[in-house]
Every structure is written in C-alpha cells, then in structure tokens.
Amino acid sequence: MTHNRRGRPREQGIDAAVRAAVNELLEEVGYQRCTVDAIAARAGVGKAALYRRWKSKAELVFAAVVHDDTLAAPPDTGTLRGDVTGVLADIQSALDGPQVRNALPGLLADLRTEDAPAARLGELFLVRERAYLVEVLDRALARGELARRPEVPVVHAMLLGSVFAWLHLLRETVPPGGLADALAPGLYGAIIVLGR
Amino acid sequence: MTHNRRGRPREQGIDAAVRAAVNELLEEVGYQRCTVDAIAARAGVGKAALYRRWKSKAELVFAAVVHDDTLAAPPDTGTLRGDVTGVLADIQSALDGPQVRNALPGLLADLRTEDAPAARLGELFLVRERAYLVEVLDRALARGELARRPEVPVVHAMLLGSVFAWLHLLRETVPPGGLADALAPGLYGAIIVLGR
Amino acid sequence: MTHNRRGRPREQGIDAAVRAAVNELLEEVGYQRCTVDAIAARAGVGKAALYRRWKSKAELVFAAVVHDDTLAAPPDTGTLRGDVTGVLADIQSALDGPQVRNALPGLLADLRTEDAPAARLGELFLVRERAYLVEVLDRALARGELARRPEVPVVHAMLLGSVFAWLHLLRETVPPGGLADALAPGLYGAIIVLGR
Amino acid sequence: MTHNRRGRPREQGIDAAVRAAVNELLEEVGYQRCTVDAIAARAGVGKAALYRRWKSKAELVFAAVVHDDTLAAPPDTGTLRGDVTGVLADIQSALDGPQVRNALPGLLADLRTEDAPAARLGELFLVRERAYLVEVLDRALARGELARRPEVPVVHAMLLGSVFAWLHLLRETVPPGGLADALAPGLYGAIIVLGR
DNA sequence: AATTAATCGAGACGGTACGTCATGTCTTGAT
DNA sequence: ATCAAGACATGACGTACCGTCTCGATTAATT
C-alpha cells in the first residue's frame, strides 16, 4: 500500500528527521509533552507531512521508537539457557532505552483507543517476538532439552511481562549484572518445567 | 492532611457516587474519554468536590478502580504451588475486570508524570503485593519447599508481569481454565528453581 | 438569552479586554492576520473564553468593532439637508476608522458563510440605521420638505452604499471637507426628487 | 510578462476549463470553500498550471468571474435619464449573478491584502466604469441636460455603491421592475442637482 | 439565635495540545 | 517549457481536556 506512482514522491529525509526529532523530544520532555507541533518544528517539517504518513501522534511515536534492527538475528547460543538470556536481552533492549522508557506507557494508553495501530503494534513487534520464541523453543526440543513445546503465549507472557514489569510497573533499577541475567534463571526454570 | 474540623462536613455519598460514575464511564468509553467533567456530571457532583478529594484525574480513577478487598486475605493453601496460584488469581482480579482493563494503560501513563501519586500507587498496591509475596515465600521456606528465599523483586516481576503482559500487552483472551491456572505451573517452577 | 443564574458568572473584564485586543490587532495587522490566538494572547484570555461568547472569529471581530454609541442620537438639524449630512457622517464614522476599515471586507466575506451572525449584523446595525433614516424622512415630511416618503430601502442603499463605495470599493481618500459634505448634496437632491 | 517562446506551449483549453470550474464551485459552495485544490480537481488541471497563469486565488477567481463583455457597449439612449439606467443595469449585471454574488465579498477581502492585483481590479473594472461614466456625463453636458460636470468620483460612488449596498449590504431581493429602474430616479435626480 | 467557615453544584477561566484545512511553492516523470 | 499529480512549509482554525477559580446556597459547629 505505497503511494501512487504519479505526483511528487515523498521526500526521503523526512522520515529520518521525524524519527530523530521524536526520539530527542521523548528523551528531553517525555511522551506527554512531546507535542506534534514540537516534533514538526524540530524536524523542520509541516504537520501535514506528519499526518500524511501517520494517522495520529501515537502511530507517529510508535514508528519512531520501534527500530527494526531489534529482534533481527535470533541468538543461537547452543543452550536453551543461553538463548533465553538472549531473548530477554533483546526484549530489554526494545523496552528500555531513554526514549522507549518514556514513550511506552503513553503509547500503550493511546494505542488502546485507536484500533488499526494496535494491530500494527502486534505485527511489527509481538508477532516477530513470538516467532523468535518459537524458534528458540524448537531448538531446545531438537537438542533434547525439552520433551514437549510449552504453550507459546504463556512463555511469551512470562518473558515479556517480567521485563516490562521490572521496568515500568515496579520501576526497579536495572541490576548491575544486567536485567537479562537477573531474570534468566527463573524463567529458564519455568520453561524447563513446562517442557518436561 | 485531613480537612479542618470546622465548617460544613464533607458529604458522605459523594465518594460512592463518584466511584460508580468512574467505573461506568471507564467501561463505556475508556480512560481517555472518561473526562473529569463527565465524571462530575454523571455523579451529580461539582468538579471542586472531586479535586478537594483527589489531586488529579489519575488519582481519582485509581482510587475508584482499586478495591481494597483485593489482596485482603493471604491465601494459605498448604502448598507453594497452591499459594502461587492464589497470588496470581489475586493479581488477575486486580488487573482484570472491564474497568481496570480500560483504565490501567492510561493510569500508568498519567501516573508516570506525577510523582507523589505514583508513590501512592506503590504504597497502596505494590508494597502490599510484595509483602504478600514475602509471606508466601516464607511459608514455603518454613515448609521446606524452598531452601533459600529467591530475590523478591525478581519473583514479583515474573508474577505481576506475566499477568499484565497477558492482559495488556499480548491482549490474549483469558483461557478457559483461568489465567492463574495457566500461568501457575511455569511460575511455580521458576520459584522452585530460584529457591533451590 | 443570558447565561444561567447558577455557576460562576462570566467575568466582566473579558469582553472589554477582548474588544481592545481585537481593535489593536486590526489596526496593526489587519483582519486576516488578526488571529484568534493572537487576540486571546493579547487579551490575556483563553480561547475557550472567546468561543464561549462568540461562535466564530467573524462574530468576535464584529462584536468588537461595532460600538453601540454609533447611531445613538438622531441628529435633528432642522432641515432635511442637514439631517442627511448627519446621517452620512454617522455612517462614515461607523464604516471608517482604522479598525473598521481593515475589518469590514473580511467581515463581509466571513459573515456571508455563517447565517446566524449575518442576521445579527442586520439587527445591530442595519435595522437601527434604517429606523434612523425613517425618522429623518418623517421629519422632512412633517416640515413639508417632502410630499411623500421615498422607498426607504432605496434611500438606504444610496446613503450607505455611497459611503461604502467611497471607502472600500473606489478607495478614494476622504476629501478635505469631509466625506459627508462631499456626498450630501447629491444624495439630498436624490431624496428630494424621490419625495416630490 | 508573457511566457517564454521555447518549450511546450500552454494548452489552450485550460483557461476555459478553469473558468467553468470556478464558476460552478462559486455557485455551489461559495468563495471560501471554493478551494484552489477543488478548482484544479474539477478542471482536471494541476495547481501549477493555475499559478502559472494567475498570481493568487483572488486573481484567479476575479478573472473567472469578470466577463469582458460587461461594460462593452456604452449605452446612448438619448437622455441622461436613460443613460443612467443603462449604467446601473451594467453595474448590476457585473455585481449580480449567482457567482459574482458569492465571490465579491471574498474577493474584496483578499484583494485588499495583495497590492498588485488590487490595482488590476481597478484597471479592469473601475477605470473602465469611470470612463463610461465620464462619457455619459459629457453627453448630458453636450445635450444641455447638465450645466457643469459633477465630481466624477462622487457620482461613481453613488451609482456603484447603491447597487453594491442593495445586493451585498442590505441583501434585499431585486425588485420586480429591476434594480436599475428602482435606483435610477433618485440617482438621476442626484446627478441633475450636482450638475446644475 | 447569630456567626463562622468549610462544603456543595454549576460553570467560567487560562493554558495547552490536537487534528483539519487552505494557500502558494516545489518536485516528479511524461509530453 | 509545459502538463497532471501530489507532496511540501506555513500557519490559522475550532475543539477538547485539565486543574483552578468564583459564584450563591447550604450545613454544621461554635459563639
């Protein structure tokens, strides 16, 4: 669903400039005060150009905050234990960072209202994360570490939820050894138990 | 910081009427469109009466949505496995329900900005939940089910996060057997592993 | 149709502050660049307060520009000739002046779109002007200067139109002797001929 | 200031298509909502082609609305009285009609801002109208109907203004006998008095 | 009984952000 | 150089919401 072949094509630099502006503003002032006008001004762009690309502020920020390189390469560490740590680290890198940390609660709230973007959040992030997870579990099955594949949504909820709760609900500081290492033992144990 | 002793005393019915109005509106239109004006109108109350009692919309909604009977009775089922299921069920009952489900993301976003109320959310809910958890773990220690007490924040993040992720991130439907029963096996296993 | 008896009454100073702000801005930057935001800022007022009082920018400016003291006292000079000059001077004083001169074309354009305010323009200005005119003509009849009363709309169009055309269509400079004196002889003659 | 000789010549049909589109839109939705984009779309033309021909929306609409055949043939009816009626009829035919009636207030507002096009409006319409008027007055002088020539701007303001006020300020319906016939007696009288 | 003072419903207030829309310019590839 | 299509910066508009405030009326506890 790209734009038509005719007419002036969309300027390439705008997307990048907007993403940069959004991330700067998120870090500086947080989600609520990261105004659409401020984004447009900082990016040197008209508001019309923004609303031509995204349907709302929430979509815009979501697009700017989700970087496609996350979850790109599935980590095959040779052991389920190592893979789980890798997945957790990836989840953390997607949920942590000054921008996402500021944006996520606001995004969750705003995307809940709009329906189409919520679906896109699923596509772009959750679906890929789940595929990821399936691969990790299947590798463990192949290695004989698991006898049967646990329910994927359950595992997904445990992994993603633990990281999210740590960062956004409990708002604990990230432990010195890293969040993934702190959570991995327990969650690895959970998967082992479920896959027995 | 209670009100003065002199003058007209606060009317009793207002709190209940407001809570009812908030819950109705949350269910009907969600958090964002559950306006303070709408709440006041529905409750037949002036906005001043609201802001005399709560400092912001977020506090108001939080107070209306959190029912104190949650987490009231610590479940002692005789086994760690049973207690974990009980804690999960309590967490679910606090995070689920048509109103909370609509309110939570918005609350998280708004409470992040304000500092004092965020602390109160911690007090009222997380601290009590954590105390709960400590009690459950200690009982398991006493029973000999655990050799040592796992890191409480880690366990807390896993339990709370799994429920939250299921309901608000993955937005899966609650499974027929109940969410607590679906999550309990894995999380019980996690605790066992951590407490070995 | 004033506001209800209950609730906070509208602040009195706002109307005056807004009128002042509008008139200043009209003189400084003209109608098009006399922004609603600029008006609100200059008057130290929120936009909501403006739109609570007036339905649109056009209504707002109209209210600020029309001063009720115009056309207040019908001039009885003793002769039709003198009265006509007086009416013309009043019309000019309503249509001239740095603010009205800048606002009028824009107002005419914007009020044409909206229907209710156009009616109010009629009520507040044209109707009173016409009543004025009728009185002048009746006095001339009583004096015997006219044998019969000319069609009022025709006379109205000639008097009002001549002043308007001079100022806004031909955009001639006001002659040294005054616009009323320049136009009075011909229009007096017209009325005499029509009333013969 | 015509376009260059080299390159693709301008397409002929565009002017006509645009004029048609403008007139349709003026009649359907009025001046303000007769958008440049809408004009281009309706005419099946790019916006660049419009701005290559006219400097602004106001100029464009003005060109589309003014038909050059107006004021083409000076009416010599043999009497001043008849000539005045003729001039009034011409003025009315220029200011009336569903399109002009909708466009005129908007044009007046927009042309006030821009300077060069305002001058062109003067050239194209007012100057010719005034030349017209001079001719009519001179004929009356030659016939002996007038002893001296009245101030032309005064007469111009009275004639043009009366018609404009009737149509756009008072917004009266055109009388059954025609607007020119309704206004002619008085304005003829005015000229006679001024030329005595 | 009169006074005092905090409350009540109603609703106006300043501030601030949103999303829409229009103008006039610019950029494609094609003619 | 022109064409249709359409993206672009600019900037105004009108709406909505929040948290505060102001009104006249009400309600107790204190004089």
Image: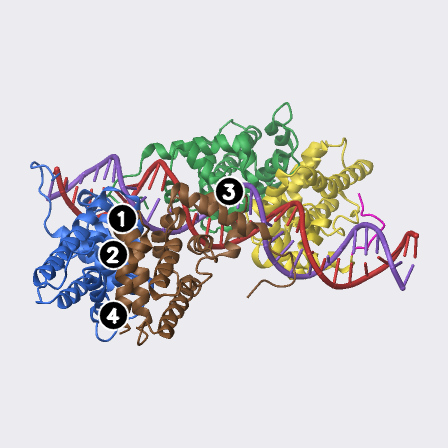
Chain colours: A green, B yellow, C brown, D blue, E purple, F red
Determine the secondary structure under disc 3.
Answer: helix
Q: Name the residue under label 2.
A: D157
Residue that label 4 marks: C193
Tell me how far mark 1 sits from mark 3, CA to CA: 35 Å
Amino acid at pointer 4: Val
| The magenta segment | B1-10
The mark closer to the camera, 4 or 1, is 4
Report the side of D101 relative to A119 (left or right): left
Instruction: Identify whether D189 is placed above or below C28.
Output: below
Q: How far apart are marks 4 and 1 (CA)?
A: 27 Å
Does dot 1 land on a helix, a strand or a loop? loop
Q: Out of D157 and D102, give the one closest to the viewer.
A: D157
Tell me the subunit letter for badge 4: C
Point out the frontmost of discs 1 and 3: 1
Q: Which amino acid does label 3 sit on?
A: Ala
Q: Where, quadrant-wise, is the N terminus of chain D in this rendering?
A: top left
Q: Are marks 2 and 1 on the same chain?
A: no
Residue found 11% across the figure and 67% down from its top:
D79
Between the C-alphas of marks 2 and 1, the distance is 10 Å
Disc 1 marks which residue? C172
Cβ–Cβ under 8 Å for marks 2 and 1: yes
- Residue A62, how many percent across, how many down? 47, 40
Above or below, comparing residue A16 to residue D188 in the picture: above
Residue D45 included in the magenta stretch of the image: no
> Label 4 to label 2, Cα distance in Å?
19 Å
For the point 26% across and 66% down, the residue is C190
Q: Which of B104 and C44 is in front in this view?
A: C44
Marks 2 and 3 close (CB-CB < 8 Å):
no
Q: Is mark 2 on a helix, strand or loop?
A: helix
Q: Find the distance from the CA under tag 3 to the CA under tag 4.
A: 53 Å
Residue B19 location, quadrant: bottom right
